[in-house]
Each structure stands twice: as C-alpha cells, then as structure tokens.
Amino acid sequence: MRTWTKFGIGLGLAAAAAVPASAQETVDLTVVSGFSPTVAAVKMLQESFIPTVNEELAKTGNYEINWQEAFSGTLATPGGELEAVQTGLADVGVIVTAIHSDKIPLYLIGYVTPFTTTDMVLVHNVVDGLVEKYPAFNETWDKFNQVTLSASGIADNYIVCSAKPIESVDDIDGLKIGGIGPNLRWVEPIGGVGVNANLGNFYNMTQTGVTDAILVWGESVVSLKFYEVCPYYFNANLGGANTYAVNVNKQKWETLPEEVQSALETGAKAYSVAIGEFAATLGERAIETFKENGGTVVQIDEQERLEWAATLPNIAQEWADEMEAQGIPGNDILHDYMSAMREADQPIARQWDEN
C-alpha cells in the first residue's frame, strides 16, 4: 500500500510539472527611427524605452516583446517615421514633430516660443500635461492612424554652430542657416537665410557649403561631432523645444493586451525623461568638448538676446490664431504653456502670450 501511494504521488507530481502554470505570450513589435543609434532619439530607445518596457512586463511574466529595431534608414529615412507608423510598416516610432509642422502644427508650441526654457524634462511634463488637458492633441493623430504615448525633446538649448566666425547677432546677417523648419523663423528677421535641413544632413550640408551655419544644441554638437565642420559656437541661448512624440500604430495598439499597452506608456514616459536628462548632461560638457577640439565659443550678450527676442514677430500669437481658426483653443494652450514656464522660473526673454 505504501508503495502504491508513493507511485501515485510520483505520477501526480510528474503530471503537474508537465503543465505550465501559465504560458508566456510573445508580442512582435517593430520600432522605427530614420536616425542611427548615434542620435540621442535612437540611443534612448535602446537604453531607456525598450529596457523599461521589458522590465515592466517582467514583473508578471505574462508577456514578452520580440523587438525588431528598424533604425538608420532601414525602414524609413528621417522624417519618414510618421508614414511608416501610419501605414503599419512599423508598430512603434519616434515621430519628429517639427519636420511635419504642416501636418501636426499643434505640436509646434515649443518652436513658437523660443528664448523660454532649456529644461527638456520640464518641457516633456508640461506638454504631456497639455496633451492630457486638451483633446485636440490626441485628435491630431487620428488622421494619421496613431496613438501617442508621450511628447519629448532633445533640443534643450539651440545655438548657432557656424563655419564662419560669429561675434554677435549682427554677424548672422547674410549667413545660410540650416534648421529643421519652424526654427528658421528665429533667424530670418535678423538677416539669416533659412535652409531646411535636419540632423541627418546638417553635417554634409555644412561641409559642402550648402549652409554656412546650423541651428543645433549642445548634445548634438558632441554626439555628431559638428565641431568638425563648424568650428564657431555662438551660444545664443535660444532655448529648447519639444521635438519628438512616441507613437503606436492604432490598429496594432488595439490588438495589444492592456498590460502591454501600460508597459509601453510607462516606457514612453521614462524615455522622455531620460532623453531630457541626457541632453542636459551632454549639453553641460558641450562647450568644453568644443574647445578641446579646436573650436571657438562666443557667449551672446544678454541684452543682445533680449533684443533678438523682441525683433521677432509674435510667432506664438500667429500660431495661436491659426489654431483658433481650426477650432482649437490655441490661446489657452499658449497661456498654459507660458504660465508653466513662469511658475518654473525659466529664463524667459519674451512673454509670448502677452506681447
């Protein structure tokens, strides 16, 4: 009898061991950026977004992601991420909102308020707050078949990196300035000739003389070695702007379990903070690195900065009026953004919602 009991117990244990408590489900996701991993937008996908999502899912073990990384133009060139996610060619992507200013103008809030802030974590928090408060932000993505998870940015403090010497704002007059589009309006009123460009071609365009200078920021100068082609760093303190949105294809999103959706949202928020902190860390070293590589740095005079800001037309109010014409409360959004910056005691050179 004792032998039979042991045998029966053995069979029961064997049967229990043969049936897993719960099977882990694998979810395939393709994440896209036209940029290479040397660009912070991609670097932080690999070092923050993806690991955070994985860590969140590992807490229960119910799901795991099979990530397909489509970077460096393998699936889309810089700027092509919007269409790639829209069509389902990619599931997740970092959309460079400034490149698509004609399609998603609502996200230009940072570009129509220059000379305002250099804190990208603050920008992320404020813009994400606006997205939560105003339905128009999420509705913007409906026509592009996407769900947005978080707004972020890496351009914490735009400067002018030039192949020609710049000692003051007056020296910008006549220079061909490369910029992402909406920020060209910052230099055109002071005589700069705007040339549409982006991180993917800034280096070559300056090297070949298509542009004399480029509107970039400290982290990009270090990461992409712009000091090799533009050895003059005019620290204009133009401030930063939200430049990225982490989005998911809408059809794909609707097929994902809630636990995976939640993990992606958590990952996107972590990404936005990480990229802002990364910008600040490298930005602090940018001037020193620039000088170490033979570059010349000129700091803008604060009075010149104030005068430059005052010289611009009120591009923020123009933007707000355009939004209002579309039924979007642009004035309220602008006021909320600037109020948040004032409350955070940012180095604002112009109160864009007041004049």
Image (cartoon, rainbow, N blue to C red):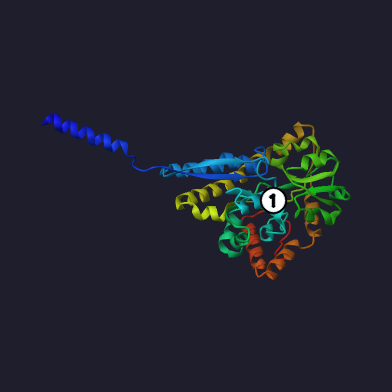
- Disc count in the image? 1
Asked whether 95 or 286 is in front, the reply is: 95
Q: Kindly tell me whether residue 355 is visible in this rendering.
A: no
Report the residue at 23% width, 34% height from top: 11
Q: Is residue 273 left or right of residue 179?
A: left
Nearer the observer, 125 or 131: 131
Image quadrant where residue 344 sits: bottom right
Image quarter of the N terminus: top left
Residue 173 position (above or below residue 40): below
Which residue appears at 33% of the width and 42% of the height? 21
Residue at image position (74%, 36%) is 225
Q: Residue 36, percent across and down? A: 67, 39
Front residue of this view, candidates 14 and 211: 14
Q: Is residue 270 visible?
A: yes
| Residue 192 percent location from the top left of the image | 85, 51
Of residues 275 and 77, the one nearer the viewer is 77
Q: Pointer 1: what residue?
A: 240
**Residue 327: percent from the left, percent from the top?**
65, 70
Residue type marked 1: Gly
In the image, taking residue 208 as reference, residue 282 lies left or right, namely: left
Placement of the C terminus among the 4 image quadrants = bottom right
Mark 1 is surrounded, within 10 Å at the Cα level, by few (under 14), some (14 to 19) or many (20 or more) other residues, namely many
Q: Which element carries disc 1, helix, strand or loop?
A: loop
Q: Is residue 83 left or right of residue 293?
A: left
